[in-house]
């Protein structure tokens, strides 16, 4: 082993700050949040120590014990034991422990020590520990454990200095490996008690502020009330705060498009590609950036505050009745951002049955890619009215769509539960962390990260599909003497008209049918595709900003509602299906998911359309 | 007394964790999380629907346990001195 490539693994209980340390050392931007089970796979990074040595750092999922209970804990165990495929055992383990929670965390430290590898203990969250008056006799702890112990504050600049110096020095000798059996495991608790008695003084077991907040947040009545108000507030904010920003972007895109294309001859192909394809298509999606950022602002704050596991606590019984588990709350909530991280987050669910059910219903949570579709239709068809002097009607409709997703997820989970043969017990066993004040800089960076992801999507897949759609809608050109718009004769136009037979009963016109095809790749693409299709079939220079008013003239309310219903269910996202395949390792589950979601989508749209038409 | 029957707020000490069946993984996990003989525990809160799950504080950690999970833990209430 050359001195140049030391491999270090970060190991510890969930939520002790391993990823925060990893980011601090490597300059990485892995996800940090205040609940157990944020990291679910191994992540690699490297940093150059002051001595000039390059250190390979491995961030691992948190684990309570090497007796792994969930897929993410298995990864940690396998890496530490050196049996993870393609991953040599680490040369040094940095065991991270939350200094405010040592009774629990020291037990795992002892378990790690018994692996018989070199270990350094990082006592993290020393800032909070000091504030709470917790006094730790570090030299004595170090002597008794027989491990080097350093203090860290992973969220403060320079807070990992002591750790860097320690790992840059000599690798400490490995402790003696010890067998792992039930009797010796029970013994670990006795050792922890001794260690605590000799080295740690805690004025109070928990933070006073946590107890005070929990009295309200977990109160049987007020707790549910707070949760409901919070959720409702988010949807109101997404609608009302974003409007001025959206207007600004719309005007900007229109002005830029007009300015850029003014130099080109109006009937050239390039003019059409830029104007009808790119500006009409991409502009229609770009407008939704502010809404997505506002949604994420709330999600990031909630994640860091420590409130999410409390919400899971409040809703566990309900979710259990429906065949899920309270633990599914966080993966499902992440799915409101995007089903992909949501589905990956199910790795922290212990029970494989609960995990599969959660994966199958995660696509029903309203992901942020649906927002463009929903808001486009709502803004065009739902009047801007105030209900009961308080609520914005458009916000209420949006909220209803979210609720529709949640209710159907519960219903589907319930059906799955009925079909399940194995009815043995499911475990919850979920830790509730301390509340924490979100850091403004971290939230801002998180939002920036999100904006980049969204813009990359717009500039990548959405741009590519838009250009492709423009080609398909432009060629072949109309025969000489044709009267209708050119798109009617193009490939895309013909495809749309063919699909129209299938979708006519649910009220979709051929333009929607065209948009749904590239929209299979990603949901927002449907909006950019509609922008392009209408720009191509219009005689005048329709640009992005006019898509809303345009469809409100051309579509019936029933069609709009039917399309909204379609989007509550339809799995119009390849990446989600791909991640289901990867996480469950089964095409069958992919087929089941896609099948039942398309089925529900068609049924819901059919009912919506026929009822809306009968009523109007 | 079972942990699931503990009144809210009253201090108690863990006696033992019983396996619901042979090789019960939930019982083993409870022991790993620190539910071992002599450890003080407290019931902090109950869920809003059917008083389930339970929020148990053990040491400085709070765990949400379903009633059926908490029922595996036998506790004795501290005799007031
Ligand atoms: N005050 C304070 N907060 C910290 C410190 N280190 C981490 N945190 C916070 O602790 C929480 C958990 O941090 P993570 O880095 O996500 O923890 P983790 O160990 O990677 O968690 P898992 O991936 O779930 O195992 C986050 O809310 C961090 O902001 C610290 O030194 N001081
Ligand atoms: Mg992590």
Image (cartoon, grey):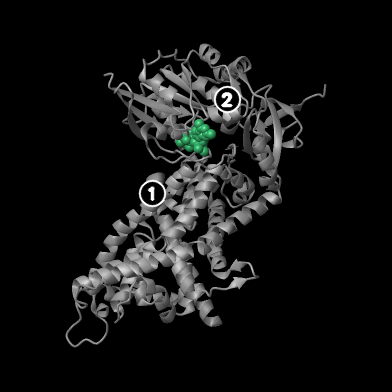
Q: Nearer the viewer, residue A202 or B4?
A: A202
Circle 2 marks a residue in which chain?
A
Image quarter where the N terminus of chain A lies is top left
Mark 2 Cα shell of 10 Å, populated few (<14), some (14-19), many (≥20) = many
Q: Nearer the viewer, residue A276 or A601?
A: A276
Secondary structure of residue under mark 1? helix
Image quarter where the C terminus of chain A lies is bottom right
Q: Determine whether A271 is above or below A54 in the image.
A: below
Circle 1 marks a residue in which chain?
A
Q: Is residue A563 left or right of residue B12?
A: left
Instruction: Give me the C-alpha separation between circle 1 and circle 2.
Output: 37 Å
Secondary structure of residue under mark 2? helix
Inspect this view and state whether residue A241 appears.
Answer: yes
Question: Does the CB distance between marks 1 and 2 fall below 8 Å?
Answer: no
> Label 1 belongs to which residue?
A579
Q: Nearer the viewer, residue A177 or A468?
A: A468
- Mark linked to residue A102: 2
Percent position (x, y) of residue B40?
Answer: 69, 26
The reply to the same-chain question for discs 1 and 2 is yes
Q: Residue at x 67, y 35 (%)?
A: A208
Mark 1 Cα shell of 10 Å, populated few (<14), some (14-19), many (≥20) = some
Q: Is residue A217 left or right of residue A102?
A: right
């Amino acid at each position: 082993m050359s001195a140049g490539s030391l491999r270090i693994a970060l190991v510890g209980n969930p939520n002790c700050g391993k990823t925060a340390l990893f980011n601090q050392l490597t300059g990485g931007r892995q996800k940090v949040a205040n609940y157990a089970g944020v990291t679910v796979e191994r992540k690699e990074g490297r940093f150059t120590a002051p001595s000039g040595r390059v250190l390979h750092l491995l961030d691992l999922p948190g684990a309570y014990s090497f007796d792994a209970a969930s897929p993410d804990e298995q990864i940690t165990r396998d890496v530490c034991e050196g049996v993870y495929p393609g991953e040599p055992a680490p040369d040094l383990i940095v065991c991270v422990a939350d200094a405010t929670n040592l009774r629990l965390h020291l037990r795992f430290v002892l378990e790690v020590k018994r692996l018989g590898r070199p270990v350094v203990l990082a006592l993290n969250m020393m800032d909070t520990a000091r504030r709470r008056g917790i006094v730790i006799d570090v030299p004595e702890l170090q002597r008794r454990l027989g491990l080097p112990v350093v203090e860290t504050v992973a969220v403060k600049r320079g807070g990992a200095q002591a750790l860097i110096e320690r790992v840059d020095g000599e690798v400490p000798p490995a402790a003696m490996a010890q067998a792992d059996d039930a009797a010796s495991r029970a013994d670990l608790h006795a050792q922890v008690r001794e260690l605590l008695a000799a080295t740690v003084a805690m004025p109070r077991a928990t933070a006073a502020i946590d107890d005070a907040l929990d009295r309200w947040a977990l109160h049987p009545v007020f707790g549910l009330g707070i949760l409901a108000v919070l959720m409702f507030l988010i949807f109101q904010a997404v609608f009302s705060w974003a409007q001025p920003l959206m207007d600004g972007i719309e005007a900007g895109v229109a002005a830029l498009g007009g300015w850029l294309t003014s130099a080109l001859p109006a009937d050239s192909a390039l003019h059409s590609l830029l104007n009808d394809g790119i500006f009409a298509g991409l502009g229609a999606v770009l407008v939704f950036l502010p809404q997505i950022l506002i949604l994420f602002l709330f999600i990031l704050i909630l994640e860091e505050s420590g409130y999410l596991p409390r919400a899971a606590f409040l809703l566990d019984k309900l979710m259990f009745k429906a065949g899920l588990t309270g633990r599914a709350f966080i993966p499902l909530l992440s799915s409101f951002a995007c089903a992909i991280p949501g589905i990956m987050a199910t790795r922290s669910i212990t029970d494989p049955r609960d995990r599969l059910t959660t994966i199958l219903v995660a696509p029903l949570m309203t992901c942020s890619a649906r927002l463009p579709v929903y808001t486009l239709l709502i803004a065009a068809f739902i009047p801007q009215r105030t209900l009961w002097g308080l609520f914005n009607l458009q916000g209420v409709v949006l909220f209803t769509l979210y609720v529709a997703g949640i209710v159907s997820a519960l219903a589907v989970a319930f059906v799955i539960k009925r079909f399940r043969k194995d009815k043995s017990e499911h475990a919850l066993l979920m830790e509730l962390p301390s509340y924490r004040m979100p850091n403004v800089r971290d939230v801002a960076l998180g939002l920036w990260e999100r904006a980049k992801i969204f813009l990359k999507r717009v500039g990548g897949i959405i741009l590519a599909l838009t250009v492709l759609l423009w080609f398909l809608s432009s060629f072949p050109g109309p025969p000489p003497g044709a009267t209708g718009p050119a798109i009617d004769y193009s490939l895309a136009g013909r495809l749309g008209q063919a699909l129209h037979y299938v979708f006519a009963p649910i009220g979709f016109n051929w333009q929607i049918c065209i948009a749904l095809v590239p929209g299979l790749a990603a949901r927002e693409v449907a909006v950019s595709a509609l922008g392009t299709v209408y720009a191509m079939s219009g005689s005048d220079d329709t640009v992005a900003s006019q898509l809303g008013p345009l469809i409100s003239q051309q579509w019936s309310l029933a069609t709009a509602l039917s399309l909204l219903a379609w989007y509550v269910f339809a799995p119009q996202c390849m990446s989600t299906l791909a991640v289901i395949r990867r996480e469950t390792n089964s095409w069958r589950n992919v087929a089941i998911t896609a099948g039942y979601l398309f089925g529900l989508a068609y049924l819901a749209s059919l009912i919506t359309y026929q009822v809306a038409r009968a009523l109007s | 007394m079972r942990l699931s029957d503990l009144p809210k707020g009253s201090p108690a000490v863990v006696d033992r964790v019983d396996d619901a069946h042979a090789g019960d993984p939930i019982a083993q996990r409870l022991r790993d999380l620190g539910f071992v003989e002599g450890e003080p525990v407290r019931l902090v809160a109950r869920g809003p629907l059917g008083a389930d799950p339970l929020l148990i504080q053990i040491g400085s950690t709070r765990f949400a346990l379903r009633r059926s999970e908490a029922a595996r833990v036998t506790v004795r209430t501290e005799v007031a001195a």
